[in-house]
Amino acid sequence: MNFGTPPIPSYSKLLSDIEAGNVKNLVLIPKRRQVEVEFLDGSAALIPIFYNDQKILRAAEGSSTPLSVKDVRGEEALASFAGAIGLGLVFIIGITFLIKRSVKIANKTLGFGKSQARIKPIEELQVRFEDVAGVAEAAEELIEIVSFLKKPDKLIKLGAKTPKGILLVGPPGTGKTLLAKAIAGEAEVPFFSIAASEFVELFVGVGASRVRDLFAKAKQKSPCIIFIDEIDAVGRQRGAGIGGGNDEREQTLNQLLTEMDGFAENSGVILLAATNRADVLDSALTRPGRFDREIYVSLPDRKGRKDILAVHARSRPIAKEVSLKDVALKTAGFSGADLENLLNESAIFTARDSVNEITNKHIDQALERLTMGMAKKALNDSTQKRLIAYHEVGHALVAALSPMADKIDKITILPRINGVAGYTSFKPDSDVVDSGLITKGYLYSKIVVALGGRAAETLVFGPEEITQGAESDLQIVSNLAKEMITKFGFSELGYVALESEENKVFLGRNLLQRKSGYSESTTSQIDYEIRKIAKEAMNEAMQKLKSKRDELDELADLLVDRETLNAEEFLRLANIEKQAL
């Protein structure tokens, strides 16, 4: 049809034309409120329907000529029905997609309950006891575990039971994890390892599910070893702390206890766990029948440090001049991880110098960096350098004149990036550190040496010109003096321990368990004794420096000029016999 542009007839005019027989075809479109009209003369028009379209149908019936009328309401109804069906299908498809997605999420959520433990098969276990140095005593105890796993019949004949659990306790970096790997390597059994924190998730019950899954897998691989690192993450005392217990953590612990109880005797599955906070573990976890043995892995002694250094030196080019025995002497209190880091830092300094071997110089640089921090550029202020020099020489002179004090290693006024203006380093008495037996005289000598810097400032510059440079020294004095009085009974207060680890509050113990160590009167007496010790030590330091007043000035001037002095130079210029190492 050709819908022309002539003026659109009015609704009343359309009715008249229909009755007069001037219309050939009509198409009613109620949805759009329109009617398509084709006239006999060939013209056409789209006319809006403002009134009831029934009038048009009645007019068509009375037309004087045959008229074709088409009503599309049925087609529109069919289209509406088809549209409704389409929407329904879209809705059903959408629901199906959501259900499938929910199933996937559910499957993933169920996966949370699977153990995250990493298993190393026998062929991948390369660590042996010979690779674990510095923990000879602990290794000896653990060798028995290897025999339990290799020859369980020997125990069964004697009516003995293999330990269900072994707890490795000790400071960080002492080789607890390495020991566990060595046991599995020596016994040649599969090794499951997991951190205790990996059990706990946001969803309650996931940790317990993972524990069940881990033990189920381990039983299938029996004999084997399960190693849980940092077990205090889930094994802390239940119902403790300020906010009460954590439901998820406690459920995980309860499941762990249940699984350990479910071990059959001599099943071949041994649980190893490591922690440096055995004091916070739940008593139900550490009772016999669960963790049957507690093995302490301590910091290495001098021989242990030498052995550890030798192990890590295998893969590094160490110069012949380097004495690992001397390095071990300087590193009292270092853990195995610290010693490995020391040699790694030494290798980095060696690479900076573009040489092929690690020398004593590089090891000393690494030791300084680890203990004191990176060095800064030298000071330009001569007055400040002189004051720092007197302070450090004061420490060194007092130490050299104190027979029970640690031996001097080096004195420097080179500042460090951590704010240290200068320092005097010592070689700790390894016999004292390694044995763990500390005498009253040794502690008192450390207090006297700590006050040597303040004493030198007071003697040279006067009490009005002393600086805050002794801040850390005074903290050492206060802490050592308090320990002498409250923990070791080294005072006139008597042979009583007024403070112990049990009196300290820590997360994992109930606040109500804290007990007051002493009364207010005793507190006043402790304060008095601390001041008394500090005053006596200060007087002793002053007397020692006065006896070497000329040497104090000479050494300070030399230190300002050279910035660093080693022990041999210092003792020679101070007219003091060489200290025995």
Image (spheres, rainbow, N blue to C red):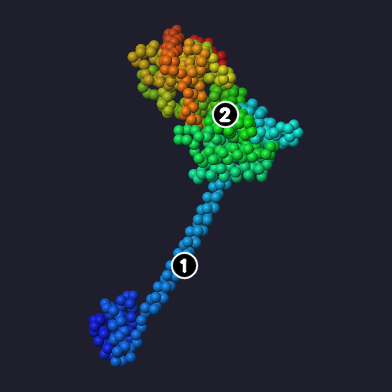
Residue at the image point whose x is 48% and y is 12% from the top: 493
Extreme residue toward the bottom, this view: 64
Extreme residue toward the right, this view: 157
According to the picture, the residue beneath numbered tag 1 turns out to be 89
Quarter the C terminus occupies: top right
Quarter the N terminus occupies: bottom left
Q: How packed is label 2: few (under 14 Cα within 10 Å), some, or many (20 or more)?
A: some
Q: Is residue 215 above or below residue 141?
A: below
Q: Mark 1: which secondary structure? A: helix
Q: How packed is label 1: few (under 14 Cα within 10 Å), some, or many (20 or more)?
A: few
Residue at the image point whose x is 65% and y is 39% from the top: 263
Residue 172 visible in the displayed image: no
> Residue 394's spot in the image, x, y percent?
44, 14
Q: Amino acid at mark 2?
A: Gly
Residue 55 visible in the displayed image: yes
Q: Which quadrant of the structure image shows residue 270?
A: top right
> Residue 305's spot in the image, x, y percent?
59, 26
Q: Amino acid at mark 1?
A: Leu
Residue at the image point whose x is 34% and y is 15% from the top: 465
Q: Earlier in the sequence, mark 2 or mark 1?
A: 1
Q: Is residue 370 above or below residue 562?
A: below
Which is nearer the eye, 388 or 110? Answer: 110
In the displayed structure, does residue 123 sit left or right of residue 530? right
Q: CA distance from mark 2 to mark 1?
A: 66 Å
Q: Mark 2: which secondary structure? A: loop
> Residue 555's spot in the image, x, y percent?
44, 14
Q: Is residue 223 above or below residue 79?
A: above
Q: Is residue 94 above or below residue 81?
A: above
According to the picture, the residue beneath numbered tag 2 turns out to be 170
Q: Which quadrant of the structure image shows residue 548?
A: top left
> Residue 318's spot in the image, x, y percent?
59, 29
